[in-house]
Every structure is written in structure tokens, then in C-alpha cells.
Image (spheres, coloured by chain):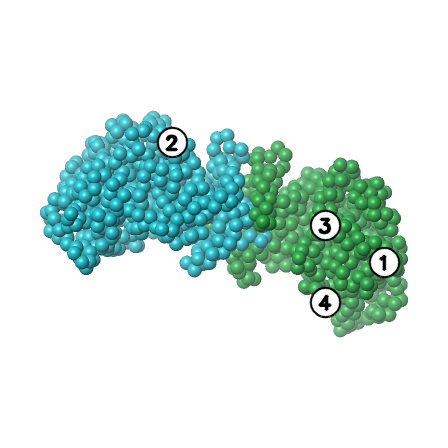
Chain colours: A green, B cyan
């Protein structure tokens, strides 16, 4: 059998990575990272508005050529590789990261008239300028079209497509008027490679559409014009210039144009897989399947699971998104997440204790010698709000049980435990609604390096904690999609079987520790339900944190 | 008018201080501190039992001569002072600090047969070895004699007289059997100076008797023999060898013996005032009077107030002690306290942030720039339990409202605020039961040095915060008692008028800050009442902290 290689291209927050892998076994033969040159580490900021985070679309195009060429050049140093053996290309990106484009699918930001205008750039996933618009969308949907909210957990986010587009319409109407259409980065890059210059012909992935733009086949695509008209008639008009249909990755986004084939030294016409979100393709590259939760653990976490599309999956209250085909064809893609995990530990170690990487290591080592329950501490993991299952950004942290002898390592451990309890709440909610989870596969630096963290999770979750074999699962997942699109494997499942692996080190629950954590999780849930405002909860503090945040805001403002 | 000087002797935890003051104006003319030579900083410890804290009675006697002679020698360097002008002596000590004595009022510990036996030493106030005995006393009294618990807030403490004596009986029955009687340090030192060698003739102060030994004129003195018999018949027998009557400071404890007069170069026969507790005489030296709360702020706080004995003061639930005559003759002495104030800040700065004195200063400065409510934080001040008004050692700390941006200085400020809320809860409880507080006078290093702390207290309490003029108010208060005993002033009130003063610096409430703190105190009380188990509280977590402590104990033990 001839050698076949797949190319995965992963657009992260600060850089783009290209990865060349062997379709036979997923072996990585070449990689290259390109840092976005614009702004602060690739992010355009506004000193007057901390909620703004944009990117220069020019960086995406420059980075595409540079990273892919670099990865191919690196692969060429391996014996036997030639560029002509690359059979397909896959792309994953951050999202929702939409940008306004003209009638030729060229980002407005590349037009000298709009260059440098922040409103005309790409709206990075973590741009929160559309907070008011998000609240208005949630309110309007709750009143007039509650079905739109069911699959997204009940709350529309400021990080999502319509909040951003509407914000542009309100803040920079001239930019909005100049835009022919809007394109998600995940759809834009495959279209560029395929040479698609008409926005109407771009293949739109259901990841972005379903999870971020309230798209569903159940109601005929994007939200109805009547609904959008309630927000702003101009949004209803825009709907005609967006798309009727979005697709899972069971069809390609296009084929490589001769122009880009020449630039990259690849064969023209090789398939380009449907674009997807980094977390989703990361789940694919981690071996996601029924019964497996993939946790991408970073500053926050993104949790991905799939459930066979043969059985109808109910909406799960508090779970951000359930979209048919969004992670892998043939499955419902289910997305959840925790607002702060690495960030909570960073806050404690670097913010409060004023330490560095060394202190992370020292506190982990010290925390390892504290037995479950021994600190007497329980914390809530809400320093950055709660994304799942309460979907409430207006929550805050809580620590209880401290004495005069409580150490910083004990608090560090309690914060890890708190995030593990938060993870357990998500898994229990999924199981309760028919998505049972038997094992957890993790990716990210914490999973690879922090054994204390992983053992606590195994003991709290009562499930084996596994670590993905590749350190760059999103790019690997995109390469898998490419391999499938190219026919190197018949299905995603078959490709995963050959191309993904787990690290040998796995963490299994200790039954004794599990028993203590079952008890402490009970305490966590009492606090969680009371302070989180769960109806019928034992305690009665549904508004306490919100009141404190309101006081803080008021007293900071004047 | 002839010059007259009074001598105050203050037995602290680590040292004894003697102070010579001018009866006319309280001016300090000589002082000397003597560090107890035994044990660790004067405390005998048991490496096997962290709850044990004893003292060597020999240190008290050696320290008496050394400190007084030192103070007199220092005074002699002042123009015009002679030892013959000393007209009286007052003594204050820690307490409850009882010790076993023989039939000649000699501490067993001074007898070569018992020397070095820890059970035969003085049981320092913070010795907690009698925790089980304290719980049994509370239980027995609750069942058979609840009236004994009413004036002490409902709970008998392991720090108090009967817990310690009973513990000796159980742990070292030979020592208990060898003891003829037991004497509080506050009664022992005046008896030594007066040359009283018969325990039956020792004048017992109502401070120690009323606050620590369940003594009350209302039931004819110490607890009835029937009650003591329920604990142990030998305690009932001991009652006969203790005392029938205890007294306020309106009568002297005795007059200076010729033996001690010769040792010290003083006139024999000058009056020795009734002994008292350091906190009580500290309140006297701070100018305590109706409507004034004196806060002695250290690692923990002791709060003292007085209410005219002409009006019957009701028992105040949760206030540790209300004893007629205990602080000043003619008043009910009311004692409350917070289990941790300086200790909570020390825990945060030194324990968690691993800083030193410099960091205390830096965090205070930074905390000063945080406005009330601006941190969004509220804490409970229970890292060491709650002494008043919940009287529950099995409570722990709580912090709520933290985000990823919360700083160590904000937490530091929140902890100061938490102790201020705790102080407000005490003042409100007193007012509610007929002891209104109009101003607060503070003593201790924090009061003198930490302006942020004091301003927060003024704003939270809504009352002026004043600072006692003398840095050694207990010794000054003892000297005032001596001056009154000697007739240099007709009453305590008159003596205080002339001999005490306040520092010029005073802290007045800022109305705007007060309003924010009124709101935050509401949040504190919601948490306080819920987690503290106040019946009918809004929330519902009366056992949560206790469960965590129980889990901690269980998991630490095995």
C-alpha cells in the first residue's frame, strides 16, 4: 500500500500549528508553529475596553502558508516523505471567531479602507463586547422562541456569533453595512484553500452553526427571520446572505485550489475536510467515542462527548450544546465546560501566593501528602463563574473549613478538588440525561504533568483518568478528518483506531479515597445548589454572590 | 499634698511587668519586665500533648521581687521619688490559671517531691487538657443545674477552673490528693505579698470566681456539693477547702507583710488591692465606664464592658460572663471575646502568604486603597471557632466572593472586616440586652499601629474608635486599684478620671463607608446565622462546618 500522509492545521488563540501525520498509524512526521504577528501575542486589544479581543485576518493567511510549508519542510527531513504523498487537509480553529467579508469572500480587514478598524477584524472567541446583545438575545428567545435555547443550555453567550455580529451592527454600523456576509474562521480557512470566492458557496460546518449560531435542522437552519427581526431588521436581512444549510464532517469543504497547491508544493484537488472547532477535533484526536468524555484541560476546560445519532438524545439542562454531527459524523456532539481550572490554580499560586512554576510543583508535591478529607476544606470552583451546569457567570468563589493552621498547599489541593467536584457535576448531569460516561480522556499540560491533579480527579469521579497520546490532539483530529475525507480510512472510528493512542500512564480510583470524596462531594453539592440558586436546594443563598458582585461593581464604579 | 505612688504588677503569659505610677496623674515613673525563666518563653510544654500549657510557680515568686525591685530602681532615677512614697500595690494576672497548694499556701510545685511534675504546676489559662471535662461539666449542668450556665453564655470552657482541677484529679490523682487547696494566680500573688499562709484566709477575687469557677452570690458561692458530686465526689470534698465568699475590689486583699516590705524597700502595712484578671484591670486602665466597650486586641480579643449594678442586668445569651463586681466595684463586669483577630491576620500573612512583619505593613497599605465593598469579598472570622456570641469552637472559616483577580491584600482587608463584623455582632447583642455601647476604646499593638484596621472598625461599628493612652493598661489598672485601696482616690471612677487618658488619634465613622458596611454586615449575618446554626436562620447549614471538622479528624487519625 502506498504511503499516505494527512495535514492537520490548528488555529489557536496565539498561533497556528501545522502537523503532518502518517495516515497508517498517526505518527507525526513534521510540525511547525507560526505566531500571529499582530497585536499582543496575536490579539488586538482596546486599552479602553478590557472585553475586546480581535484578530487580524491577515495573520491567518500569512500563518497558513508559513506553518504548512514549515511542517512539510520538517517532514521532508524524515526519510521517504514527499509532499505528493499528502492526501488531504483538515483545519480546526477557535470559535466562535466570525469576521465580516465582502462579496468575494475577502475579509473587510484586508481592504485598505477598513484596515486597522477594530470593528472590521475577526472577533476572537473570547471577545465579550457583545454581553448586552447576548442578554437581549436570551431574553427575546426565552419570550418568543424558547426552542432556540434548549440545545444550548438555556443561555446565549456573549462569546457567540449573533452577539458579535449584532454588536458590530450597533457599534459600527458602517462596518456592518460594508460587509456582504460573515464567516467563521473554521469555515474561512478551508474556503481559502479551496479557492472559494463566493460566500454563498462556502461549506459551513455544523460545529460553529449549531453550537454558536442557533442553527438546527429541526427549525430549518438559522433562527427564523421573524425572530432576527425582533433583534434588528438588518440581522434578518443578513440571514439571506449567510447560509441555508450546515454540514457535519462527512463531506469535504472543498478541494485544494491549484493556486494554493502551487504555493505549498502539494497536489491540486486533494480533499479539504470540513472545518471544525479545536475542542471538537481535539476530542477526535483523543479518541472520543460513546461512553468517553474528553476533557481539554487548560485555563478553563472544554468537555466533549458523543452519543450515537441513532438514538435521540434529549436536551440536557445546563449543558452548553448538543448538535447532531458537530464532533463526528453519525453522533450528537455534546459540549460542556468549566470556566476556570488551570486559571484557579494559577490565581492561587501566582496571584495570591506570588509564586511561579516552581511553586506549582512544590505545592503539588505537598498537596500529594494531604489525604482526602484531611484539610477539612471544601471550595466552590466558581472564581470565573460557572459555565456548566448552572450557566451563570455571576457566581464567585467560596472556601469553607479553614483554621489558623490551614496551609497554602491544603488550599491548593482544595481548589483542585473543587474543580474535580465541578467535573463530577457535569458527568452526573450527562448520565442523568442518558449520556453515561465510563472513562475520561484528558489533554493539556496539566493532564500530562500533574499526577496529583489526575489522581484526585480519578478518586472524585470514580472513573479511570486517561491521557491522550498526542500533545497536539486538535491538529491530529483535523488530520484524521483529512485522512477520512481522502478515503485513507472508511470512517472516523476506523481512523481513530489506527491513528490515536493513549499514554501508558493511567490513573485509577482508590476505593477508600472515593468513599471520602463521595461524602465531600455531598457537601460541595449542598453549597453548589444553595449558592447556585438551584430550585428546591437545601440552603437558601441564591442571590448572595450576585449581591456581592453588584456591590463590588457599584463601589468600583464611583 | 504629699506625693503618692502606686505599684501595679501585671502577670502576663510570658513575663511579669511592674509599673510605678504617680497617683495624681497616672504618669509612669518606673517600669521593669521580668521574663519567666522556665520552659519555652515561660510556658512548660508536653511534646506529646499540644493542649498542655503549664507554668512554674517559682517563676512567679522570683519574678515578683525582680520586677518590682527593677521598677522601683528605675523610678528612683526620676527626681524626687522615694520608695516610702509608694502607698499601695495592685496585681493582675492571666486566668483562669489555678495551681495546687499545700496547707501552708505553698504551691506543690515548690516542694521537692513534686518539682518537675507537670500535673503539680500552675495550669496556664490556655491549657486545654481539660476539654473532655469541660464538655462533661456543660452537659451535667445543662441537665441538672442550668442556672450555672446562664451567666457564662451556656458553655463551660476547658480553659476554666473546674475543667483543670478535675483533669488533674483524673490524670494525676496523687497530685490531686496531695493538694490541700487550689488557688488562682490572681489570688495567690496578693496573698504572698500579704504573708497569708493559710489558704482559708486568702481573699478570693470575684473575677476568677465568677467568670471561671461558676461562683455566684445568687446560689451561695461555688457550685453546690450535690452538683460537684455528680462530677466526682472528691471535687465535692475539695469545695470545703476552697472558699465560701469572693469579693469585688472594694476591699483590699491584705496589707504588705514586713518580710516582703523589707525585700522591696517599701513600707510594711500598705494595702494590697484585690487581685484581678489582666483584661479586667486593662479595662480599668483604659477608662472603662458605662457605655464604653474596651477591646484588648491581640491574637484574640477580650472585650470588657460594665453596667451599673444599680440596675439588674439580664443574662445575655452567648456572652461569656456577667459578674457583679468583677471589673470594677459597683458594676456588673461583662466579658466577651473573639477567638482570633491578630491570629487570623497572622495566619493569612505569615501562614499562607509566608511573609513577615514587612508584609503586614505592605498589605495594610494596599488594603487602605481598597474601598468598602470593592473587593466583593465577605469572610467569617471563625478560623479558631467563635467565642462570642455563638460560643462554638467547632466552627471554621469561610470566604466568599473571590474571582480570578482577587488579591492577597483584598483578602487581608476582608479578614479585618470579618473580625469587625464579629465585633459588631457582640456590640449588637449587648445593646439588645440592655448594655448599650457608645464608644470603643482599644488597647494592644494593632490598635496603636494599624490605622486601616481601626478605620474599618469605626466604619463597620459606626462608633468612634479610641486608643488607650497607656501601652500597659493592665498594670496601670492594677495601680489604679492600689491607689483606691490606699485612699489616694475615693473611687475607681475618680481615679480613672485623673490617672487614665486616651491617645489623641481617634477614628470616626465615615457615613458613606458605614452605609456600605451596613449592607455587607447583612450578608455576614446571613452567613453567620446559617453556618453558625442560629435557630430560624435563613440559610440552612448548621452542621456543615462540624461535618467537615469531623471528617478532618477522622481522616487525620487513621
Which chain is mark 4 on? Answer: A
Q: Tags 1 and 3 in contact by the CB under 8 Å rule?
A: no
Alpha carbons under labels 2 and 4: distance apart: 72 Å
Q: Nearer the viewer, mark 4 or mark 3?
A: 3
Residue at the spot of label 3: A130
The residue drawn where x is 66% and y is 52% is A301
Residue B226 sits above or below residue A287 on the image? above
Residue at the spot of label 2: B434
Along the line of sight, which residue is nearer the eye, A187 or A235? A235
Give x and y (percent) for residue A71: 76, 68
The residue drawn where x is 57% and y is 47% is A555
Of the numbered discs 1 and 3, the one sitting upstream in the chain is 1
Residue at the spot of label 4: A37
Q: Nearer the viewer, mark 2 or mark 1?
A: 2
Q: Secondary structure at mark 3?
A: loop
Figure quadrant of residue A505: bottom right
Amino acid at each position: 500500500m502506498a504511503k499516505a500522509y494527512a495535514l492537520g492545521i490548528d488555529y489557536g488563540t496565539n498561533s497556528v500549528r501545522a502537523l503532518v501525520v502518517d495516515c497508517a498509524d498517526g505518527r507525526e512526521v513534521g510540525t511547525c508553529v507560526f505566531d500571529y504577528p499582530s497585536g499582543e501575542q496575536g490579539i488586538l486589544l482596546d486599552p479602553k475596553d478590557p472585553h475586546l479581543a480581535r484578530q487580524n485576518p491577515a495573520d491567518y493567511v500569512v500563518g497558513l502558508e508559513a506553518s504548512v510549508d514549515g511542517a512539510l519542510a520538517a517532514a521532508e527531513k524524515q526519510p521517504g516523505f514527499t509532499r505528493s504523498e499528502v492526501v488531504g487537509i483538515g483545519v480546526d480553529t477557535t470559535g466562535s471567531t466570525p469576521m465580516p467579508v465582502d462579496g468575494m469572500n475577502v475579509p473587510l480587514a484586508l481592504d485598505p479602507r477598513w484596515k486597522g478598524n477594530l470593528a472590521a477584524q475577526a472577533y476572537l472567541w473570547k471577545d465579550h463586547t457583545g454581553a448586552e446583545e447576548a442578554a437581549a438575545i436570551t431574553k427575546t428567545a426565552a419570550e418568543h422562541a424558547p426552542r432556540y435555547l434548549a440545545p444550548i443550555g438555556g443561555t446565549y453567550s456573549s462569546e457567540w456569533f449573533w452577539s458579535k455580529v449584532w454588536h458590530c451592527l450597533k457599534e459600527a454600523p458602517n462596518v456592518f453595512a460594508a460587509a456582504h456576509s460573515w464567516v467563521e474562521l473554521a469555515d474561512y480557512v478551508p474556503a481559502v484553500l479551496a479557492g472559494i470566492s463566493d460566500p454563498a458557496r462556502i461549506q459551513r460546518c455544523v460545529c460553529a452553526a449549531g453550537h454558536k449560531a442557533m442553527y438546527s435542522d429541526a427549525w430549518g437552519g438559522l433562527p427564523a427571520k421573524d425572530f432576527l427581526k425582533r433583534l434588528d431588521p438588518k440581522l434578518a436581512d443578513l440571514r439571506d446572505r449567510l447560509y441555508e444549510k450546515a454540514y457535519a464532517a462527512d463531506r469535504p469543504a472543498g478541494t485544494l485550489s491549484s493556486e494554493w497547491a502551487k504555493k505549498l508544493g502539494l497536489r491540486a484537488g486533494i480533499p479539504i475536510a470540513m472545518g471544525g472547532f479545536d475542542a471538537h477535533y481535539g476530542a477526535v484526536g483523543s479518541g472520543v467515542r460513546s461512553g468517553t468524555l474528553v476533557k481539554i484541560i487548560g485555563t478553563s476546560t472544554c468537555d466533549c462527548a458523543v452519543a450515537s445519532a441513532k438514538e435521540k438524545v434529549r436536551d440536557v439542562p445546563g449543558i452548553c450544546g448538543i448538535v447532531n454531527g458537530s464532533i463526528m459524523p453519525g453522533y450528537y456532539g455534546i459540549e460542556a465546560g468549566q470556566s476556570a481550572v488551570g486559571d484557579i490554580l494559577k490565581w492561587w499560586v501566582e496571584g495570591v501566593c506570588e509564586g511561579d512554576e516552581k511553586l506549582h510543583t512544590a505545592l503539588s508535591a505537598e498537596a500529594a501528602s494531604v489525604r482526602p478529607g484531611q484539610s477539612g476544606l471544601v471550595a466552590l470552583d466558581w472564581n470565573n463563574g460557572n459555565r456548566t451546569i448552572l450557566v451563570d457567570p455571576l457566581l464567585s468563589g467560596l472556601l469553607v473549613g479553614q483554621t489558623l493552621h490551614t496551609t497554602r498547599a491544603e488550599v491548593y489541593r482544595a481548589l483542585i478538588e473543587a474543580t474535580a467536584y465541578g467535573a463530577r457535576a457535569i458527568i452526573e448531569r450527562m448520565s442523568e440525561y442518558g449520556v453515561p460516561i465510563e472513562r475520561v480522556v484528558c489533554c493539556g499540560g496539566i493532564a500530562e504533568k500533574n499526577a496529583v491533579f489526575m489522581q484526585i480527579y480519578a478518586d472524585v469521579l470514580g472513573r479511570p483518568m486517561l491521557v491522550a497520546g498526542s500533545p497536539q490532539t486538535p491538529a491530529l483530529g483535523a488530520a484524521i478528518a483529512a485522512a477520512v475525507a481522502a478515503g485513507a480510512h472508511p470512517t472516523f472510528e476506523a481512523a481513530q483506531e489506527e491513528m490515536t493512542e493513549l499514554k501508558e500512564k493511567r490513573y485509577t480510583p482508590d476505593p477508600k479515597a472515593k468513599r471520602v470524596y463521595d461524602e465531600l462531594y455531598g457537601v460541595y453539592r449542598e453549597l453548589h445548589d444553595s449558592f447556585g440558586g438551584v430550585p428546591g436546594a437545601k440552603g437558601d443563598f441564591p442571590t448572595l454572590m450576585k449581591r456581592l458582585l453588584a456591590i463590588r461593581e457599584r463601589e468600583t464604579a464611583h
